[in-house]
Image (tube, rainbow, N blue to C red):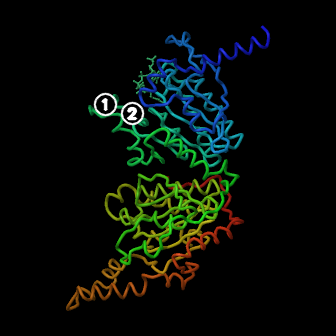
């Protein structure tokens, strides 16, 4: 055969291999409202940047008639490409080929592209759409999962890892996304669960749909497994592209700078915050007044709404925001919000993204539910991750900073580089009402008019402690600033902290309160 003939032969082989499970299976996939795997890859990547590898990898499974089956690409497409000009490694499971099930060759393709991503120091993106362990391949499938989880763990904190759930992700398969940094889900398309509806029916006798059990909304709103929720695959791909612009290639690099833009939102900050300290406001409005182009890219928007986390830019540089949300539960810290913020702080710290913390919270949420759900253990994660973080850390106390909440929200005592407070800041062990009731209990109960004395004592306490000046007198905050100076103080502090170098005691690793 001449080279020309061999080239034609290659083209023929490729044309057949890229057909996945064949036309009918692809039609079925599309009828379910799902894009075929290659189209997904091309929709995420910049035009014509995808280079596929291992198209001709073939399974070696025997038994259950497997020797008769040639599974195209073994049900997973792997390669490299670019997103918004950023190089990435990517894989997408192809449900049209044996339900995207994971056998040994399929797993080896994934672990190979993960190894490449780690060697090339670029992010890895995995699109999951699979019936799970390939039943015919038995323990080899389990081995494959184990080898993926192992690499997820090695890659954690070294390169960004992104999981996109675009179909079923069942059984042990869910643990790879759970080990990655960001999980994207799409309404009606994504399904994630450990045990499916049939097992639940058999074992527990309960009827439940896949959607109710582990649909996109469940993971975006209830479990917190998902970080981004979209109503269509296309919207999901736009979210992935946006995320990529905010994060670096790896833990040795910084995210790409962008041209600095002033905030679009022109509110006066004093007018967003209500005069009455018991009234809520939307913390996102404050963030948007401060950041470049008023562009705040929120993470886990639909879960644990009492804390807001996300990426933005200040003077063109990526920063990670952690801020209490007075609109939800007055912005208290609880089990879920502590988990949410603590993990985000660790992501930012791993990937050289400075942290900005906005504080307005009455403390940790009291009550038996929270105590029994482990608010001590979960709340401790906040202390651990802020204390451990060595990236530049700047805090602004907007209003309430009470009790443990004051300490946990990146206080000076946990290593903040700069702490500022608005004149509205109230820094105290607890709120004035609670404090007056405790320390003046006897005086109040013995008074001729207890209610009047209580009011007087609350005022007295407020006057003394519910302000930023006691903390300022101790040097725990660096400056009391006017709200409209917040952006310039943040930019200036982060600029000065650019060359920050802080080390921690040498150890194998710490033991966070997981
Ligand atoms: C082999 C599989 C498969 C699997 C699906 N297929 N899952 N083949 N191993 N795990 C095949 C089907 O036989 C079918 O082949 C094709 O893929 C499409 O599947 P359908 O069932 O027709 O699709 P659909 O009706 O959309 O249902 C999708 C599904 C269902 C809900 C995912 O297929 C299903 O329940 N699959 C089994 C899920 C599961 O229990 N997996 C094991 C989990 S345990 P044909 O040839 O007919 O087209 C696990 C342990 C991992 O993963 C532990 C790691 C630590």
Q: Residue at coordinates 56% horizontally, 74% vertically from top-left? A: 419
Residue projecting furthest to the top: 1
Q: Neighbour class for label 2 at 10 Å: few (<14), some, many (≥20)?
A: few
**Closest to the observer, 168 or 133:** 168
Residue 195's tag is: 2
Residue 402 x %, y %: 43, 73
Residue 491 x %, y %: 62, 69
The image quarter containing residue 316 is: bottom right
Which of label 1 and label 2 is nearer to you? 2
Residue 203's tag is: 1
Q: Is residue 8 left or right of residue 154?
A: right
Residue projecting furthest to the bottom: 448
Image quarter of the N terminus: top right
**Closest to the observer, 472 or 248:** 248
Please say whether residue 402 is visible from this viewpoint. Answer: no
Residue projecting furthest to the left: 448
- 226 vs 172: above or below: below
Residue 463 x %, y %: 40, 87
Sequence-wise, the earlier of marks 1 and 2 is: 2
Mark 1: secondary structure: helix
Please say whether residue 388 is visible from this viewpoint. Answer: yes
Residue 106 x %, y %: 58, 25
């Amino acid at each position: 055969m001449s080279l020309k003939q061999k080239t034609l032969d290659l083209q023929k082989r490729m044309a057949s291999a890229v057909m996945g499970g064949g036309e009918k299976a692809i039609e079925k996939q599309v009828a379910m409202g799902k894009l075929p795997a290659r189209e997904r890859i091309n929709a995420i990547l910049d035009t014509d940047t995808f280079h596929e590898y291992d198209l001709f990898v073939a399974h070696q499974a025997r038994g259950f008639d497997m020797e008769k089956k040639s599974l195209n690409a073994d049900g997973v497409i792997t390669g490299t490409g670019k997103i918004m000009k950023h190089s990435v490694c990517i894989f997408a499971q192809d449900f049209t080929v044996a339900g995207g099930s994971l056998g040994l060759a399929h797993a080896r393709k994934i672990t190979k592209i993960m190894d490449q991503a780690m060697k090339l120091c670029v992010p890895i993106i995995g699109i999951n759409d699979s019936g799970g362990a390939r039943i015919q391949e038995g323990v080899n499938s389990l081995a494959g999962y184990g080898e993926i989880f192992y690499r997820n763990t090695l890659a954690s904190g070294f390169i960004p890892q992104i999981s996109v759930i675009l179909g079923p992700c069942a059984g042990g398969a869910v643990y790879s996304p759970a080990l990655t940094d960001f999980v994207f889900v799409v309404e009606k398309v994504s399904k994630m669960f450990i045990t499916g509806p049939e097992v639940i029916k058999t074992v527990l006798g309960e009827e439940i749909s896949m959607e109710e059990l582990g649909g996109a909304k469940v993971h975006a709103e209830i479990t917190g497994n998902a970080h981004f929720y979209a109503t269509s695959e296309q919207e999901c791909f736009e979210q992935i592209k946006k995320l990529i612009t905010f994060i670096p290639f790896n833990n040795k690099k910084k995210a790409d700078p962008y041209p600095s833009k002033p905030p679009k939102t022109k509110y006066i900050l004093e007018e967003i915050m209500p005069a009455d300290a018991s009234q809520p406001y939307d913390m996102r409005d404050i963030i948007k007044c401060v950041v470049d182009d008023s562009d705040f890219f929120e993470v886990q928007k639909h879960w644990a709404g009492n804390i807001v986390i996300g990426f933005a830019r200040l003077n063109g540089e990526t920063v990670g925001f952690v801020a209490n949300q007075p609109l939800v539960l007055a912005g208290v810290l609880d089990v879920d919000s502590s988990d949410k913020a603590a993990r985000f702080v660790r992501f930012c710290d791993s990937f050289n993204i400075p942290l900005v913390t906005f504080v307005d919270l009455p403390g940790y949420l009291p009550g038996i539910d929270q105590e029994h759900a482990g608010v001590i253990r979960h709340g401790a994660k906040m202390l651990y991750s802020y204390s451990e973080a060595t990236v530049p850390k700047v805090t602004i106390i907007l209003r309430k900073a009470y009790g443990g909440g004051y300490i946990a929200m990146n206080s000076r005592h946990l290593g903040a580089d700069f702490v500022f407070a608005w004149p509205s800041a109230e820094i105290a062990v607890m709120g004035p009402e609670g404090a007056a009731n405790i320390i003046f209990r006897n005086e109040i109960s013995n008074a001729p008019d207890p209610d009047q004395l209580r009011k007087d004592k609350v005022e007295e306490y407020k006057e003394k402690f519910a302000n930023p000046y006691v903390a300022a007198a101790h040097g725990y905050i660096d400056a009391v600033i006017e709200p409209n100076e917040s952006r310039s103080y943040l930019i200036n502090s982060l600029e000065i902290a650019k060359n920050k170098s802080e080390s921690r005691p040498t150890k194998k690793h710490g033991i966070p309160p997981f």
